[in-house]
Amino acid sequence: MLGGKHVWQSSPRILVEEYAEGPHYSADTMGNTVIAIGAADFGQPPYFVVRGCTFPAPLTGEEFRRITDASLRCLQTFDLGWGPANIEFRWTKRGPVIIEVNPRLPGWVTPRLVQLAYGVDLITAHIQLLIGEEWDLSARHSRTAAARFLVPDRDGILDRIEGTSRAAAVPGVAEARFYIEPQSPIVRKGDFRDSIGHVIAASTSRTRTETALQSAVELIGWSITPFSKPRRPSRY
């Protein structure tokens, strides 16, 4: 890149980033309190397609302590003790490596999972902070909540979807839904946008939660007709 004939407007530079390999964890904080630590599963690299996430993460006491300590150091370093934050890690051979520090509430289904697992409503707590009311971040119960994301294996037109009502009726399942309707085009991008739906379950044990998720997912079906001509993924 630097040795080419391209005429640069300024001095060319390259940013080299380390590849952090290991399980993915995220810490959700409010003020200077770590409320929840979750784990996420991804598909095969080089893509970043999330397949599922679980709260609380299955950590040893030492792993929990180190992620908590690293999270609190992030809050102090970036002066983020004023509100919500979401901090992502990879657990590598040398321990937790920080991937992202986001000064905001977590997105997607995470607030729902935290509420099911701990009884803490992150969204309500944030609103209480903004309007100057007292908040209560103490856990009201201890359960295992998890999500399984529905990810297509091909591009094309979504012909049909079925089974969400039956999946939602499985004991322990809190939610089962698709994000798109039949006849929608599907063009995979290799990231979180590839998901077309999810199932959420919660119970008093990790085994029961995983069993409920698997039972629900097996009841859900869809079909995709490939495009007559390949389409390129959309770009920002």
Image: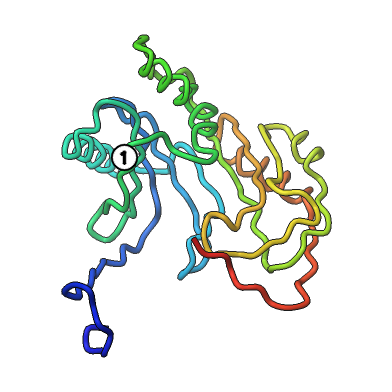
Q: Nearer the viewer, residue 167 or 61?
A: 167
Q: Quadrant of residue 221?
A: bottom right
Answer with left or right where residue 116 lies relative to residue 172.
left
Which residue is drawn at the image coordinates 61% and 47% (left, top)?
A: 148
Residue 82 position in % (x across, y down): 26, 25
Residue 184 falls left or right of residue 47: right
143 vs 86, left or right, is right
Given residues 31 and 12, the one toward you in this image is 12
The residue depicted at 80 percent of the width and 38 percent of the height is 165
Residue topped by disc 1: 64
Q: Position of residue 147 (x, y in %)?
A: 58, 43
Left or right placement of residue 89 versus residue 15 in this view: right
Mark 1 nearby-residue class (10 Å; few <14, some 14–19, many ≥20): some
Q: Position of residue 69 (x, y in %)?
A: 22, 38
In the image as oriented, which residue stretches furthest toward the top?
133
Report the amino acid beneath label 1. Answer: Phe
Q: Does 139 appear above or below 236?
A: above
Q: Quadrant of residue 77?
A: top left
SS assignment at label 1: helix
- Name the residue at 37% across, 9% down: 133
Q: How many marks?
A: 1
Measured as percent of width and height from the top left, residue 2 is found at 22, 83
- Which residue: 43% across, 41% down? 38
Q: On the rendered image, what quadrant is the N terminus found in?
A: bottom left
Image: 218 above or below 207 = below
